Image (tube, rainbow, N blue to C red):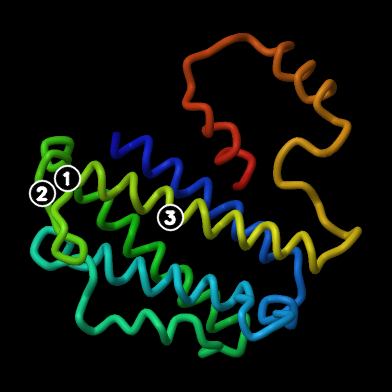
């Protein structure tokens, strides 16, 4: 379960990375109203969540007293470089923590806002949370990039060609994301 979760987290990170790489620095901070989150704000929120959830997850509540969640929804970062460095550091914490989890840790109870859940459920909870926000990042990046957007999945009107290529291959028992991770190198 941990191994598969790591692959999925890497996949969602890769989607967000590829989406953010397609847009300008200004577009990272673009929003049309005060109620709308820019990509940078979504990233700040994810980073704050990652630090809170993955720091000392076995010994401390996942909602840390030092976290200021409301501040995550303000534009606190103003350059791509700082935003992406912060992003990378948070993901590294997540992956280091996941690498340290043994299969027999999955049934242990940890707490988020004083609510007990198994480590396995906590991992799944965060995987769903991050995929939700990555979807927002991809959608917003696609919106601001206009006709310059390069699809991150099967492009429109390309399903038949994609399927023909897939069914031309020999079946194997690789994880369904292995080919995506190989292409990202």
How far, Cα to Cα, is label 2 from label 3?
19 Å
Residue named by callout 3 = 129
Q: Residue at x 15, y 67 (%)?
A: 61
Q: Is disc 2 placed on a helix, strand or loop?
A: strand
Q: Position of residue 127 (x, y in %)?
A: 40, 49
Looking at the rendered image, the quarter that the N terminus falls into is top left
Q: Position of residue 178 (x, y in %)?
A: 52, 32
| Precedes in sequence: disc 2 or disc 1 | 2
Q: Is disc 3 placed on a helix, strand or loop?
A: helix
Q: Residue at x 37, y 63 (%)?
A: 92
How far, Cα to Cα, is label 1 from label 3?
16 Å
Residue 121 in the image: above or below residue 47: above
Closest to the observer, 163 or 89: 163
Q: Quadrant of residue 56?
A: bottom left
Locate residue 133 relative to residue 49 in the image: left or right: right
Residue 102 in the image: above or below residue 62: above
Tell me, for residue 68, which label it has, or none: none
Q: Position of residue 57 (x, y in %)?
A: 17, 61
Query: Are discs 2 and 1 less than 8 Å apart at CB?
Result: yes
Query: Are discs 1 and 3 less than 8 Å apart at CB?
Result: no
Q: Residue at x 70, y 64 (%)?
A: 140
Q: Is disc 1 placed on a helix, strand or loop?
A: strand
Tell me, for residue 109, which label it has, or none: 2
Residue named by callout 1 = 118
Sort mark 3 into few (<14), some (14-19) or many (20+) by Cα contacts within 10 Å.
Answer: few
Closest to the observer, 122 or 7: 122
Q: Quadrant of residue 106?
A: top left
**Mark count:** 3
How far, Cα to Cα, is label 2 from label 1?
4 Å
Q: Position of residue 55 (x, y in %)?
A: 22, 68
């Amino acid at each position: 379960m941990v191994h598969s979760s790591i692959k999925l987290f890497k996949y969602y990170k890769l989607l967000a990375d590829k989406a953010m790489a397609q847009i300008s620095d200004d577009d990272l901070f673009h929003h049309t109203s005060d109620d709308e989150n820019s990509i940078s704000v979504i990233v700040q929120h994810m980073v704050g969540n990652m630090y809170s959830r993955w720091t000392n997850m076995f010994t401390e509540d996942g909602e840390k007293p030092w976290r200021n969640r409301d501040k995550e929804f303000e534009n606190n970062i103003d350059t791509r470089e700082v935003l992406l460095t912060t992003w990378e550091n948070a993901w590294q914490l997540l992956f280091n923590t996941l690498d340290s989890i043994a299969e027999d840790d999955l049934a242990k109870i940890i707490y988020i806002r004083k609510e007990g859940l198994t480590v396995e459920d906590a991992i799944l909870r965060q995987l769903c949370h991050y995929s939700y926000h990555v979807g927002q990042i991809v959608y917003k990046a696609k919106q601001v990039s206009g006709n310059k957007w390069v699809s991150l999945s099967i492009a429109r009107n390309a399903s038949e060609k994609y399927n023909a290529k897939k069914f031309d291959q020999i079946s194997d028992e690789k994880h369904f994301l292995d080919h995506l991770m190989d292409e990202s190198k």
